[in-house]
Amino acid sequence: GMRAVIAVLRASGNLKRSEGHLPEDILVLRAIIDVNAPKFLAPDVPLFNGITSDLFPGVVLPVPDRKAMQAKSGESCVERNLRLTDYFWG
């Protein structure tokens, strides 16, 4: 409903502020994916990907740079005596 629309608009605004150099179609698509994908079960992801590819034909998302987040995650795991696996970032 409207909460989902507001969440996508907020995410789009945040991305525009942090990644303003990217075209708006990429920003909106990334916001839609970032807001909605965590809510889906694995079997639903291909359907969602199909819907987004129909809504944004030919738009290819650049891979986000998450090196800083991965480094901090690794540090946090070491501090807590946890093992960070590749599966988490894959």
Image (tube, rainbow, N blue to C red):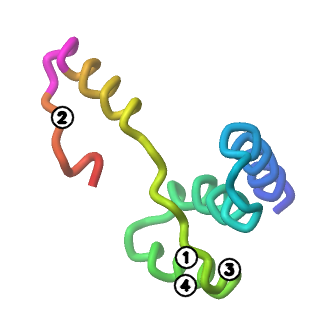
- Position in image of residue 76 (x %, y %): 28, 19
Q: Which mark is residue 48?
A: 1
Residue 48 lies left or right of residue 66; in this view the side is right
Helix, strand or loop at label 1? It is helix
Foreground residue among 78 and 69: 69
Q: Residues within 10 Å of mark 1 (few under 14, many from 20)?
A: some
Between discs 3 and 1, the one toward the N terminus: 1
For the residues labelled 1 and 2, the Cα–Cα distance comes to 28 Å
Provide the residue designation for mark 2. 84
Of helix, strand and loop, which one carries label 3? loop
To which residue does mark 4 refer?
50
Q: Is residue 59 above or below residue 23?
A: below
Q: Residue at x 54, y 84 (%)?
A: 50
Q: Position of residue 5 (x, y in %)?
A: 81, 58
Q: Name the residue: 45% across, 57% down.
A: 63
Disc 3 from disc 1: Cα separation:
12 Å
**Amino acid type assigned to the residue bearing label 3 in the image:** Phe
Disc 3 to disc 2, C-alpha distance: 35 Å
